[in-house]
């Protein structure tokens, strides 16, 4: 799964990176994004067709849900089964998005403890998760937009740490992933593959990242761990 990630770039850099305009919203760099928080997503504007960046809540709530209580358990969607799941099938056809990041965290069990690791593309460049989004209406009628990150089988780098990894899209696929004219789930599922491990690195980080209240650069700063703790450290 993917339960925490980092997006430490300023909004101007994200605008340039994704050739997208921000809605009139504030954003500051984040180092420990947690479920149910509001996160930037890149979507196609339904009228102009141009890319835009919006803040929506992480943890998908299906349009037909009676309430939003299950949002925290819907932060991820399995790429292999999303097309068959009622919560995700329509979004996979019609409401795909890019979820920008520049790192994500996974935890490795070490005895009774868990050691967190930060994973990056190359040396911390911006990338995008494959995302789905949905609109749910509260009983009052107020609309709530939410999203989920698609996950897949792990590559050689992530496998020793976790049995799943988030889908990281090749930038060459961005336009096709966002294209509302492509509704064939078999076609879009071809994008949902493990990312090339040779283009990634990982390193252990401190337990500061365990607490969502900690949201600073120290959360993703490399630390050294002893041999007795176990290690997977790729430069």
Image: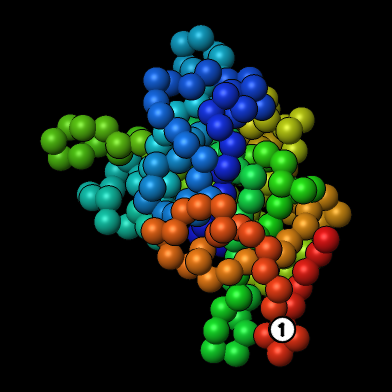
Identify the residue at image location x=15%, y=40%.
Answer: 139
Look at the image and tell me in which quarter the N terminus lies: bottom right
Q: Is residue 40 left or right of residue 7?
A: left
Q: Is residue 194 left or right of residue 71?
A: right
Q: Residue furthest top?
A: 48
Dividing the picture into quarters, in which one does residue 179 lie? top right
SS at mark 1?
loop
Q: Residue furthest left?
A: 140
- Residue placed under numbered mark 1 in the picture: 226
Q: Is residue 130 left or right of residue 72?
A: right
Dividing the picture into quarters, in which one does residue 51 lie? top right
Look at the image and tell me in which quarter the C terminus lies: bottom right
Dividing the picture into quarters, in which one does residue 154 lie? bottom right
Vertical placement of residue 71 versus 173, above or below = below
Identify the residue at image location x=27%, y=56%.
Answer: 69
Q: Where is residue 181 shown, x and y percent of the image? A: 59, 22
Vertical placement of residue 3 versus 141, above or below = below
Q: Where is residue 9 shown, x and y percent of the image? A: 59, 37
Q: Residue furthest right?
A: 198
Identify the residue at image location x=60%, y=29%.
Answer: 14
> Which color scheme does this rendered protein use?
rainbow
Vertical placement of residue 149 versus 112, above or below = above
Identify the residue at image location x=71%, y=83%.
Answer: 226
Q: Where is residue 184 shown, x and y percent of the image? A: 62, 34
């Amino acid at each position: 799964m993917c339960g925490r990630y980092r997006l430490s770039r300023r909004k101007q850099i994200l605008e340039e990176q994704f050739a997208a305009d921000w809605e009139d919203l504030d954003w500051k760099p984040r180092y420990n994004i947690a479920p149910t928080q509001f996160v930037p997503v890149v979507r196609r504007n339904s009228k102009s067709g141009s890319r835009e960046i919006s803040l929506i809540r992480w943890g998908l709530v299906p349009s037909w849900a009676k309430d939003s209580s299950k949002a925290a358990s819907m932060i991820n969607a399995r790429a292999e089964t999303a097309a068959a799941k009622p919560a995700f099938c329509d979004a996979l056809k019609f409401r795909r998005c890019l979820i920008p990041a520049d790192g994500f965290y996974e935890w490795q069990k070490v005895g009774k403890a868990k050691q967190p690791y930060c994973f990056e593309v190359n040396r911390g460049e911006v990338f995008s998760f494959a995302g789905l989004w949905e609109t749910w209406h509260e009983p009052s009628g107020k609309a709530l937009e939410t999203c989920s990150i698609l996950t897949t089988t792990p590559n050689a780098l992530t496998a020793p740490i976790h049995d799943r990894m988030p889908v990281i899209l090749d930038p060459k696929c961005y336009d096709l992933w966002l294209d509302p004219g492509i509704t064939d789930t078999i076609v879009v599922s071809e994008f949902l593959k493990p990312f090339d491990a040779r283009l990634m690195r990982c390193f252990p980080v401190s337990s500061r990242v365990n607490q969502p209240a900690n949201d600073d650069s120290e959360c993703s700063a490399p630390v050294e761990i002893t041999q007795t703790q176990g290690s997977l450290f790729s430069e």
